[in-house]
Amino acid sequence: MTKQNTRQKIGIIGFGNMGSVIAHRLSVQDHNYDIFVFDKEKEKLSNLLGIKASKDIHDLAASSEIIILAVKPQDLDHILKEIKKYVSGKLVISIAAGLSTKHIERILGAIRVIRVMPNIAAKIAESVTCLCKGMYATDEDLDLAQELFYYLGTTRIIEEGMMNAATAISGSGPAYVFYFIENSTFDQANIPEHARHDMMRRLEKAAEDLGFDTETAAFLAANTVNASISLLLKTKLLAQELRKQVTSKGGTTEAAMEVLTKDGLWEEAARAALKRAEALARRD
């Protein structure tokens, strides 16, 4: 059997911050996949290396075996309706914050869906990524999704009921770290250990406040803080700039930052992020 016969086609819809990172990581790290991408902003798809641009969203959905939805929550329903007739028998992976697998299944039908929440540290392959599966997805589907996102960093399978909480902790958490560093007196290129541990304690406490068990809270907090600091050091960008990159307008992180900028606690910020994620989920 030739290697070509075993290659799977992965189509990624959305080539923004996270979609482009996923595409590049998979194209560089694993040669068992052919990567196709589509974005409504065509200029984003110029000068691609090892990645192929699809002519339109229908072409991508029709030709891909695995479809990754890397779009903003407010754009997801439109995208789902566009691809609905092409997804039978395929695996659909969504990274849209706040929108459940049930929501996606309601539009697509009895389709295998995996929901994923990576974070900005995917840019340096140190993401903290949480995953769960929908009603029709199999354990093998979940294993495959976990394998794909392992190329972006560490992974954690959780219950879907905790995915919005994960969005508030590991998804929005890097912004809490960057804001803390931004407003500290120490040099961001030389972050003291006591400051690192202080941030871990704050995020762990926030995670427990949202309902995570002690072990999971500690895992998410330690990995999120360490990955955020690593991103800061490796990119050499200002903490303020990275915080802005995490904070999408109308998103969960923006809700959290409104609390932190008023001297709120990390638990309060995480609760605000969770509330925003739940509000996105209630749209339907």
Image (cartoon, rainbow, N blue to C red):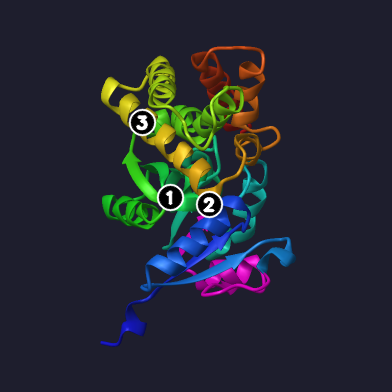
Q: Which residue is drawn at 27% across and 55% down?
A: 140
- Whether the residues at callouts 2 and 1 have beta carbons within 8 Å, the answer is yes
How crowded is the residue under tag 2: few (<14 C-alpha within 10 Å), some, or many (20+)? many
Is tag 2's residue or tag 1's residue first in the polypeptide sequence?
2
Q: Which residue is drawn at 50% across and 52% down?
A: 123
Q: Give the range drawn in magenta.
A: 46-68
Give the amino acid at mark 3: Ala
Q: Is mark 3 on a helix, strand or loop?
A: helix
Q: Is residue 76 above or below residue 85?
A: above
How far, Cα to Cα, is label 2 from label 3? Answer: 37 Å
Mark number displayed over residue 108: 2
Q: Is mark 2 on a helix, strand or loop?
A: helix
Left or right of 142 in this view: 103: right
Give the amino acid at mark 2: Leu
Q: In this view, does 40 lie above or below 124?
A: below
Left or right of 231 in this view: 53: right
How far, Cα to Cα, is label 1 from label 3? Answer: 29 Å
* One can see residue 88 in this view: no
Residue picked out by circle 3:
222
Q: Which of marks 2 and 1 is in front?
A: 1
Is tag 1's residue or tag 3's residue first in the polypeptide sequence?
1
Residue picked out by circle 1:
113
